[in-house]
Image (tube, helix red, strand yellow):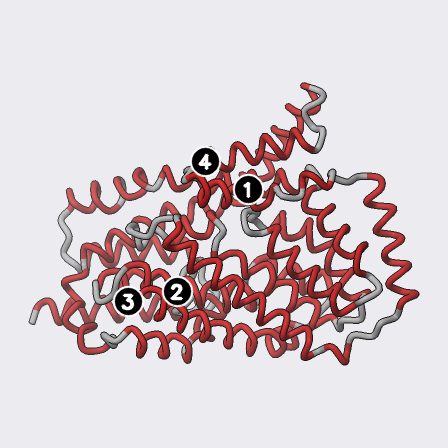
Amino acid sequence: MTNLIIGILLLLTFFAFIYFVMRGGNIMIGFFFMALLWTIIGGISYKVAINDIFSQPALDYGSTIVVIIFGSWFGRVLVDTQIAGSISEQTIRVSHKHPIVAAILVCIVTAFIFTSSYGVGAVIAVGVILLPILESLGLPKNVSVAAFVLSVGAPMYVNIVIIKQIQLFFPKVLYGSKYLGYGFAAMIVQMLVVVIFILVHAKLIHANEEIVEEKNKNGDDILDKKSAPIYSYFIPIMPVFMNLAFGWQPIPALLLSIILALLLTGNMVSYRHCLKLINSTINKSVSDISGLLVMLFILTMFSAAAVKNTARFSAILHNIIPHSPLIIAIAFAILAPLALFRGPLMVWGAGSATAAVIAGTGFFNQYFCFALIIVPAVSMAVSACVTQSWNLWALEYTKLDPKKFLVTGVPWAWGTCALNLLLAVVMFN
């Protein structure tokens, strides 16, 4: 009976946290108070709380933070060495006479860049090039923005920075061939949805060759002034390739990729210039994710408190959560819009509590649980929600009405969630 009462109290605070976040409350503060409340309500002793909840989890997470920092640094190097921008410009240069094909290629290139690149700074640097190009091809603002952010979101299924964050809840999930097989499949599914999305809106794409030609000339001028050599275009996929082909861990793979990016773009010719660029990219990359890092450390505390309280609410959840992978996948697919506005299916919002609960039940293998959490987070929240920082930037940059953005993108993101959750049932069960 005691466990039942405590379990009910824990669930009540869980729903209070969801309400707090969806009302615009600070997520980091919410995580901290949830860790405190679940420690107190769960009756966890003082010594255990100090050592096992508020200290050791953050210390243990340090190695993951290092990977996130290196991943962010690599993303900034891709931008500041002009590799990302050059790939983007080259795409439109070779296909500007075929606007529909060009739009699809731009989206594919965007996805390619962000398989390893990460951060709002990187998205902005690429977006200021690609969004005007998409509009010049005849895509209406709402279509071009939705296509762009869906394309940024798709590779997050394999982006090491994203994976490492969610591994906090599912430590048995390794960044290796087993997960990446699913990750690339889910990425391809989302990109196929983007292609269909563009084709459905093809009638709105007017092949105005004069405007496109003028835009392309302007792009050529920019590219002629500052561009990366074609033989450096493979760099964005290099970290993932080194992991799959040779089993390299993320840090050496990212370091090699950074060195190659600097070397192949001619930024190692001068020692002073190289050092200046390295220092600049490090400063920018850490600044891009500084708030995220602190939030993740606080999140480890809440996650540890949730694990300690698993037995308290397992009896309640045992009768609520479906034990069939197919049924729970269908339920998550139907409820996928709850990932919007940092809701209960958004792992970097109120959904962190959901992830902790799912991980604590032990009903399913961790790879399937990981998919349950990452699909609505990536395909719905990252790819179609206005609370995602780079999505909000895209709306402000293009002066697009948020409601129109949501109406345009959410149905396609919802369909992607359903497909990728069913894919997880097939691949992990």
- Residue type at mark 2? Ala
Q: Residue at x 21, y 41 (%)?
A: 51
Q: Which residue is mark 1?
A: 238
Residue 308 position within the rendered picture, expressed as x and y whole percent measured from the top left: 18, 55
Q: Residue at x 78, y 60 (%)?
A: 133
Picture quadrant of residue 212: bottom right
Q: Distance from label 2 to label 3 (Cα)?
A: 11 Å
Reading the chain from its start, which is encountered first: label 1 or label 4? 1
Q: Which residue is mark 3?
A: 13
Q: Nearer the viewer, mark 2 or mark 3?
A: 2
- Residue type at mark 3? Thr
Picture quadrant of residue 77: top right
Reading the chain from its start, which is encountered first: label 2 or label 3? 3
Question: Residue 191 vs residue 26: left or right?
Answer: right
Q: Distance from label 1 to label 4 (Cα)?
A: 12 Å
Q: Residue furthest left?
A: 1
Q: Which residue is mark 4?
A: 251
Q: Nearer the viewer, residue 95 or 351?
A: 95
Question: Residue 385 vs residue 331: left or right?
Answer: right
Q: Nearer the viewer, mark 2 or mark 1?
A: 1
Q: Distance from label 2 to label 1 (Cα)?
A: 34 Å
Q: Are marks 1 and 4 in contact (CB under 8 Å)?
A: no
Q: Which residue is mark 2?
A: 350
Reading the chain from its start, which is encountered first: label 2 or label 1? 1
- Residue type at mark 1? Met
